[in-house]
Amino acid sequence: MKHFLEMSPMAERILDAAQGLIQQQGYNGFSYDDVAKLVGIKKPSIHHHFPKKEDLVAVLVQRYTHSFRGELLNIEGRYASPMDRLAAYGAVFEQTFNRDRRLCVCGMLGAESGSLPDSAADEVASFFKVNLDWLTQIMGDAQNAGLIKKNCDAESLAQAYLSALEGAMVLGRGMRTVQGPADIARTFLSTVSA
Amino acid sequence: MKHFLEMSPMAERILDAAQGLIQQQGYNGFSYDDVAKLVGIKKPSIHHHFPKKEDLVAVLVQRYTHSFRGELLNIEGRYASPMDRLAAYGAVFEQTFNRDRRLCVCGMLGAESGSLPDSAADEVASFFKVNLDWLTQIMGDAQNAGLIKKNCDAESLAQAYLSALEGAMVLGRGMRTVQGPADIARTFLSTVSA
DNA sequence: GTCTATATTGTGATAGAC
DNA sequence: GTCTATCACAATATAGAC
């Protein structure tokens, strides 16, 4: 299977379209024909770039995780304080949600995990691990700096924060309100603050 | 459309089967044939009880919300302390998740909201409202009793808690770990405690 | 790389016999 | 209430021409 770093412009456009569809409808809720219509080519042309739907989604999640890693680096470069970093992390989710109330790709696919090809499910698991590792690190930094209470370990706080952000998007969609992850991030961070 | 309180035993069995499928695969991930195989009758017989998939899901979510209301009453009857009630609420999610790592019906359908018939989406929104109203009430009680910090309003805390629980199930499925909402509930409640 | 055409299977849904 | 038979359509996927 091709790597997402050596991909043609058309393959990129296909992934862009498919990603939007997954964020709105889920893995079982979009078809190759939907993608084809969005990018303006015919269905079999999609198969030329990604022979099977399984391939498409696996690469898509790889790319998504990679771009998230970029965001994490970005946050580290822009903010020094652990609390600012945690707030900026929540803002990434808010930004995604504000774009037509899109879900996190892996929030959607994680929920659908039971009807996902293994290759895709593996990539989703990897996404969560990357994010939890990073959050655990920052939560630990915040605790060592005396910014966050120490009555819970950093790993538990990381899981609770990520869970709250993913869940906030689900609630926001399910209730059809404009409210998104930003408020939940604020609430969470203010409750854990020392 | 029929009400879920006046339903035949077979209709109940169909809903039971469909609910399990939704919790594992989502709305777009199960078919009338899947349900038929589970309950041991043929596909058209399902249509006899629920003419359209839209009907089935709307009734299913109504029944789910109703049963959740029962749980809330149960918790109120069993526990007097707001903190105990909040912990018991988290335990309901843990119980669901421990059964084959099933998702909350409305967590799954909320995520899939974009490809849901209106009738179903309305019921999902109603589920979240019922739960948030109740949680807001209990959070307020806890604050008034001095058990929870007052630096966030009760409504925000309710949203954060429910988001964290729904998200915990998504993470648990996506990462293929046994870990579920119980730990997240514990972490959350200990961070908001006064 | 893209297309037309097609194979194959699955899906929601209906008609009508028992 | 349940069944067989069937419809119309959509899905993933492939073959082969241009």
Image: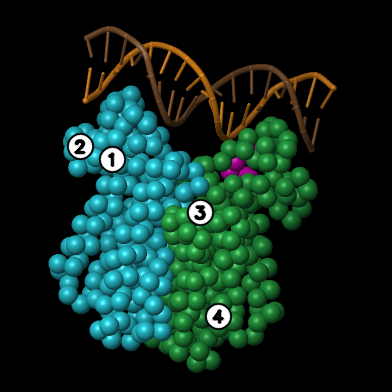
Chain colours: A green, B cyan, C brown, D orange
Observer-nearest of A41 and B183: A41
| Marks 4, 2 in one chain | no
Q: Amino acid at mark 1?
A: Leu
Where residue A10 appears, as percent x and y from the top left, is 76, 45
* Residue at numbered disc 4: A138
User: Circle 4 marks a residue in which chain?
Assistant: A
| Tag of residue B7 | 2
User: Circle 3 marks a residue in which chain?
Assistant: A
Q: Residues within 10 Å of mark 4 (few under 14, many from 20)?
A: many
Q: Which residues are magenta?
A: A51-56
The local secondary structure at tag 4 comes to helix
Q: Quadrant of residue B191?
A: bottom left
Where residue A63 appears, as percent x and y from the top left, is 66, 57
Q: Which is the main secondary structure of the residues drawn in magenta? A: helix
Where residue B160 appears, as percent x and y from the top left, is 41, 70
Q: Residues within 10 Å of mark 2 (few under 14, many from 20)?
A: few
| Marks 4, 3 in one chain | yes
Q: Quadrant of residue D17?
A: top right
C-alpha gap between disc 4 and disc 3: 25 Å
* Residue at numbered disc 1: B15
Left or right, B99 with respect to A70, comes to left
| Marks 3, 2 in one chain | no
Mark nearest the camera among 3 and 2 is 2
Marks 1,3: beta carbons within 8 A: no
C-alpha gap between disc 1 and disc 3: 24 Å
Residue B127 vertical placement versus C4 (above, below): below
Marks 1,4: beta carbons within 8 A: no
| Tag of residue A108 | 3
Residue at point 59%, 47% (across, down):
A21
Q: Amino acid at mark 3?
A: Met
User: Circle 2 marks a residue in which chain?
Assistant: B
Q: Amino acid at mark 2?
A: Met
